[in-house]
Image (tube, rainbow, N blue to C red):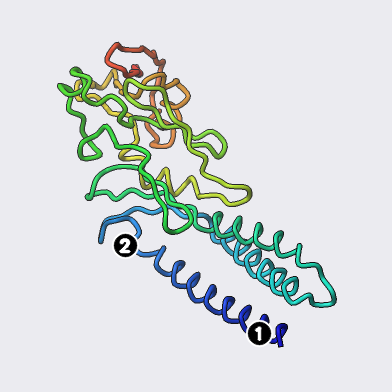
Amino acid sequence: MKRTLLKIITIVFIVLFAFIYIWLESFYYTDLTCGCSSACSSFYISKTDKIIGYIIIFLSVIVITVSLWKFRKISRWWSILGLLLLGTAIYGNSLMFFNPNICGSSLNESYLYFFSNKIGDWAKTDSEHINMDSLKLRKLDGKFLGYYYLNNDLIIYRIGKKPITLHTNFLFWNICKQEITKHISYGLDSYHLPDNSEEMTILLGGQDMPIQAFMQEVNYNNFSKGLKYQKLLKFDDGTTRLYIYR
């Protein structure tokens, strides 16, 4: 009688878990998870990694079930391993970065479906322009300006503060960096100062932004044509500037 009751309870929990997880997955791929009903840019893990995560979840549920039922005298200690695999796969499948855009130009991280935290704001007020007076008054300290991809790490440079490093992967789960670069580069790119000329272009980036970060952006935007040489300078307003001469 106890074994029969245990099997019934286990089946009920499996069905309930499957229902909740499917609902979370469908909810996760809507704009509502960004806190904005429109114009939200979301960056999820790749489809291949997601499918592997589904397989791990399926196998972990089987391991938990057969261990609880003591199928062929399998120890119930295996359920602990199943729970660890289940939690790891759910965490990996739920990784996401997003930018609410018109609801506030910022970069946010979401995990375990229910939890999210704000990483920081763009320095550009409309993702295109910078208020130079606010910059001089140090009102933009801590704002994002410039980025650099190094392996699976997204290094974001900030005005007047040290850069921060975001891991865009967890174990084998990876967020497509091409998609992130494509959709948030307009907000995170360095700022082209308006006093540029045909012979010289000035790019404004965050504190301690190296020339490699500037050039990654320049090459990505096919901006390096006719480049003769460049000069990097640090300013006391918490920014770094790259002078490109043609």
In the rendered view, does 6 fall on the left or right side of 196? right
From the viewer's perspective, is the residue at label 1 or at label 2 nearer? 1
For marks 1 and 2, the one nearer the N-term is 1
Residue 215 vertical placement versus 137 (above, below): below
Q: Nearer the viewer, residue 172 or 76?
A: 76
Quarter the C terminus occupies: top left
Q: Nearer the viewer, residue 206 or 109?
A: 109
Q: Residue at x 41, y 19 (%)?
A: 208
Question: Type of residue at label 1?
Answer: Leu
SS under mark 1: helix
Q: Give the image location of residue 129, x and y in percent.
A: 21, 33
The quarter holding residue 30 reads bottom left
Q: Give the image location of residue 177, x and y in percent.
A: 49, 45
* Numbered label attached to residue 5: 1
Reading the image, the residue beneath label 2 is 32
Question: Type of residue at label 2?
Answer: Leu
Quarter the N terminus occupies: bottom right
Q: Give the image location of residue 193, x and y in percent.
A: 24, 24
